Amino acid sequence: MNIFGIGLPEMVVILVVALLIFGPKKLPEIGKSLGQAINSFKAGAKEFENEFKREAKQLEEEVKVSKYESDSETEKAVNVSSSQDLSQKSQS
């Protein structure tokens, strides 16, 4: 059993020291508070990850739209210049 790089003997020593410092009545409250803090941190991290993914997806879609618009503008410019070239050649 290895949690955060701490083995079973180290966990027992930490538990005994915490029991001596805080006493048996206060230890469950501290454990509950610590668990709530960890859950809150996990929820915040998950929310941050979801927001990051949402922004990345939105940026990716904007890039696709701008690329599509620039491609269609290039095609229009080519078509306009081609028709102008044809009209100039026909007038000559």
Image: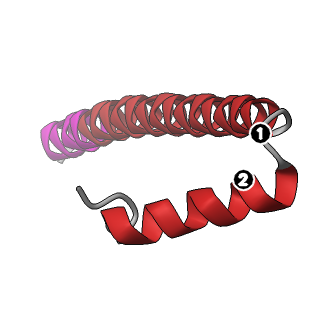
Residue 34 in the image: x percent, y percent?
Answer: 71, 40
**Contact flag, marks 2 and 1 (Cβ < 8 Å):** yes
Q: What's the image's color scheme? A: secondary structure
- Residue 51 marker: none
The residues bearing labels 2 and 1 have C-alpha atoms spaced at a distance of 6 Å
**Residue shown at 83% from the left, 33% from the top:** 25
**45 horizontally vs 68: left or right:** right
Crowding at mark 1 (Cα within 10 Å: few <14, some 14-19, many 20+): few
- Residue 19 marker: 2
Q: Which residue is mark 1?
A: 24
**1 horizontally vs 14: left or right:** left
**Residue shown at 78% from the left, 33% from the top:** 33
17 shown above or below 83: below
First reached walking from the N terminus: tag 2 or tag 1: 2
Identified by mark 1, the residue type is Pro
Residue 67: tell me if it is visible.
Answer: yes
Identified by mark 2, the residue type is Leu
Crowding at mark 2 (Cα within 10 Å: few <14, some 14-19, many 20+): some
Element at badge 1?
loop
Residue 18 in the image: x percent, y percent?
Answer: 72, 58
Residue 79 in the image: x percent, y percent?
Answer: 22, 34
The count of marks equals: 2
**Residue 5 magenta-drawn?**
no
Q: Which residues are magenta?
A: 78-91
Residue 31 in the image: x percent, y percent?
Answer: 69, 37
Element at badge 2?
helix
**53 horizontally vs 38: left or right:** left
**Residue shown at 31% from the left, 31% from the top:** 68
**Residue shown at 85% from the left, 37% from the top:** 26
Task: For the N terminus, give its image quadrant.
Answer: bottom left
**24 horizontally vs 67: left or right:** right
